Amino acid sequence: MSEKTFKQAPDFSLPNQNGDVVRLSDFNGKHVVLYFYPKDMTPGCTTQACDFRDSHEQFSDLDAVIIGISPDPVERHQKFIEKYDLPFTLLADVDHQVAEAYGVWKLKKNFGKEYYGIERSTFLIDPNGEVVKEYRKVRVKNHVEDALTYLKTSQES
């Protein structure tokens, strides 16, 4: 699976933490921070989610919506949101169709084992549904700050 580069963000519909179907196109007219992460309740994913939570108000001030996607089921997303008081939507991509559409479902290696999973990635999508910035192979430290800075700067120009 090769890197995909987009102009128009692939639309999708997935269940959120409450089981309601959410479509990317529901957010036309807003900036969307779409982030893919491997698994709820793991150290890196928890840090990243809490960083987004702590900057949520700043993203909202820029008219940006944060959406997290992982292969975890709806029930696990509910627990993750409750445990860490996450103020944004998490979507359940259990069959990884959306991850594949965005090119983030990758062969990974860990402790000598190979398996498929999410490559931590973030896509910044403008109000017209176009991807304006892609972050792939994301390192959690400072990532949310980088995305926020990019969004601020792009809105100022």
Image (spheres, rainbow, N blue to C red):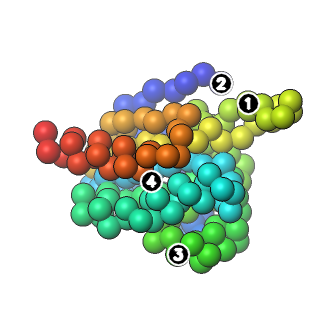
- Residue 101, image x and y in percent? 57, 37
Whether the residues at callouts 2 and 1 have beta carbons within 8 Å, the answer is yes
Q: Nearer the viewer, residue 54 or 152?
A: 54
Mark 4 and mark 3: span between their CA atoms? 23 Å
Q: Residue type at mark 3: give it.
A: Asp
- Residue 77, image x and y in percent? 64, 67
Q: Residue type at mark 2: give it.
A: Met
Residue ID for mark 3: 85
Q: Residue type at mark 1: give it.
A: Leu
Q: Which mark is residue 24?
A: 4
- Considering every residue shown, the one lying at the far top of the view is 2
- When the figure is inspected, residue 49 is found, relative to residue 133, above or below; the finding is below
Residue ID for mark 1: 107
- Residue 114, image x and y in percent? 83, 31
First of labels 2, 3 by sequence position? 2
Q: Residues within 10 Å of mark 1 (few under 14, many from 20)?
A: few
